[in-house]
Every structure is written in C-alpha cells, then in structure tokens.
Image (tube, grey):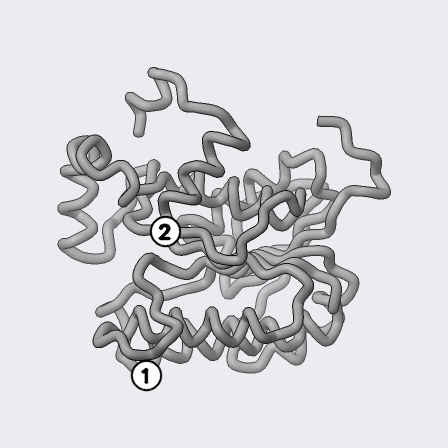
C-alpha cells in the first residue's frame, strides 16, 4: 500500500501496554497510512521507533494536561480497561466510563475531526438495565462516546479475546478459556477473536475510514478481519 505523506494519519493510542493496545501500537507503527503514533499510558512501552511518541499520564480522571498532545490528531484508539473482579465496583465504573468519556472530551475539544475507536465488550447494554455491572458501564460509555460529537465513532464489542502470546491470566475463567480455546474456537467461532486481529481491525477502521459502524459485534469483527487481511494460513491457525 503506497500512501502519499499528505494522506498519512496521526494516531493516538490509549492503553498501549495492555493486551489489545500492545498489538495496536505495533501494527500502527508498521502501517503505511500512519505517519505518527502517540501512545498515552501510565507505563512506558519499552520499545523505540521513529514514528513513536510516548506520553506518560497517570490520572485519566483529568485529561486536561493532555490538551497539547491531543491537538491536531486524526484518530484515536481507546483500549484502556479493567477486568471484572480485579477492582472494586466503583473503580470499574471509573475506569470503564469516566476515563474514556474524559479523554474523549479533551480530544473532541482539540481535534474535533478525529475518528474514535473504542474497545467495548460483548453484552454491553446501552439501556442500562443489565444486572451485570460490566455490561451497564460499557453501555454507558458507548452512549456518551456516540453523543460526543466526533464525525466517526467505532464501537468494538469482542467476546472472548484470545491473548495469542502466553501471559498470566487474570482469573480462573480466563485460564480455563485459554486451555479449551482450540475446541471453543471450533464449536463457537463467533464467540472468540484473536487479540492481534482485533487490534488490526481497530487501527484499520480509524485510519482507512472504510467501515460504516458504529457498532461491531464479535461476528462483525471476524468478518472485517477476513475482508481486510484474508483468511489465516494453516500454519497461523495452528499457532492460534
């Protein structure tokens, strides 16, 4: 893909040290349509690249100090989140709702034409009636982002995200799902998505701007992966 420099995009990624965000950063750095990647997070990525700018920011409840960093950006990915049970209910709501809404506020003020890609989750409930806190909070965040005034907002609702690379799983459910993943993927293909595939689609959508949206369920994400990147080879499937 040959992209003229004038058409290349400036991309902000929040949560680049996380599972999906990490793949998004690496993919964006190699993307021919991306001119500059600004990673905003609480920890350093530990990588170096001529396209990369890192900004450390610890308090996402107040993103006002990021105004200069977020000015004149073309697109943003928000991948920061928390696992249910890993934090208190109050912290879960703060991280899931207040952080992305506050970030979006400052981005909208400084880069009103930016496209916004948000990592939500399967079962997110915009009606607020779900008995599951995670679903309610993700739904609240989705509603606020869709109403924030960006020209394009893309909401991704993955089901089980397969980590691809070995890691310390956050709880027993994730350890079990990783162990049975080969069978689970075969029996319920539309209930799983690889972390690297999800990240690539989230980047492609905001950079290339060729998807309608605004909400993509797990089945939609898998279809977009095949459309944008083609089917995986047998070797790749074996590593999944």
How many numbered marks are there? 2
Where does residue 235 sit, x and y in percent of width and height? 35, 16
Residue 99 vertical position relative to residue 55 in the rendered view, above or below: below
Residue 98 vertical position relative to residue 161 in the rendered view, above or below: below
Q: Residue at x 30, y 70 (%)?
A: 134
Q: Residue at x 45, y 54 (%)?
A: 156
Circle 1 is placed at which residue position? 90
Where does residue 149 sit, x and y in percent of width and height? 66, 72
**Quarter assignment of residue 8:** top right
Mark 2 or mark 1: name the one nearer the start of the chain.
Answer: 1
Horizontal side of 24 relative to 74 (left or right) equals left
Residue 143's disc is none
* Secondary structure state at the residue bearing disc 1: helix
Circle 2 is placed at which residue position? 158
The span from disc 2 to disc 1 (Cα, nearest Å) is 23 Å
In which quadrant of the rendered image does the N terminus lie?
A: top right
Q: Residue at x 37, y 22 (%)?
A: 236
Near mark 2 (Cα within 10 A), the count class, few <14, some 14-19 or many ≥20, is many
* Secondary structure state at the residue bearing disc 2: loop
**Quarter assignment of residue 140:** bottom left
Q: Nearer the viewer, mark 2 or mark 1?
A: 2
Where does residue 170 sit, x and y in percent of width and height? 24, 56
Residue 90 vertical position relative to residue 12 in the rendered view, above or below: below
Q: Work out whether residue 234 or residue 70 is closer to the camera in this orientation and state it.
A: 234
Horizontal side of 93 relative to 57 (left or right) equals left
**Quarter assignment of residue 74:** bottom right
């Amino acid at each position: 893909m040959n992209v003229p420099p004038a058409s290349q995009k400036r991309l902000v990624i929040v949560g680049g040290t996380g599972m999906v965000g990490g793949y998004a950063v690496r993919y964006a750095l190699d993307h021919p349509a991306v001119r500059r990647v600004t990673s905003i997070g609480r920890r350093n990525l530990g990588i170096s690249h001529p396209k990369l700018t890192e900004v450390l920011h610890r308090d996402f409840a107040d993103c006002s100090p990021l105004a200069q960093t977020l000015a004149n950006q073309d697109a943003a990915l928000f991948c920061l989140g928390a696992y249910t049970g890993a934090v208190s209910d109050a912290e879960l709501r703060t991280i899931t709702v207040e952080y992305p809404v506050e970030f979006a506020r400052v981005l909208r003020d400084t880069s009103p034409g930016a496209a916004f890609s948000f990592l939500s989750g399967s079962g997110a409930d915009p009606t607020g009636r779900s008995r599951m806190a995670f679903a309610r909070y993700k739904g609240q965040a989705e509603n606020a982002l869709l109403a924030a005034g960006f020209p394009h907002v893309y909401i991704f609702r993955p089901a089980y995200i397969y980590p691809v690379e070995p890691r310390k799983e956050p709880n027993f459910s994730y350890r079990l799902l990783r162990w049975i993943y080969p069978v689970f993927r075969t029996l319920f293909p539309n209930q799983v998505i690889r972390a690297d595939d999800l990240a690539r689609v989230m980047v492609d959508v905001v950079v290339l701007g060729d998807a309608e949206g605004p909400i993509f369920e797990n089945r939609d994400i898998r279809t977009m992966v095949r459309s944008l990147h083609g089917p995986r080879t047998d070797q790749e499937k074996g590593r999944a």
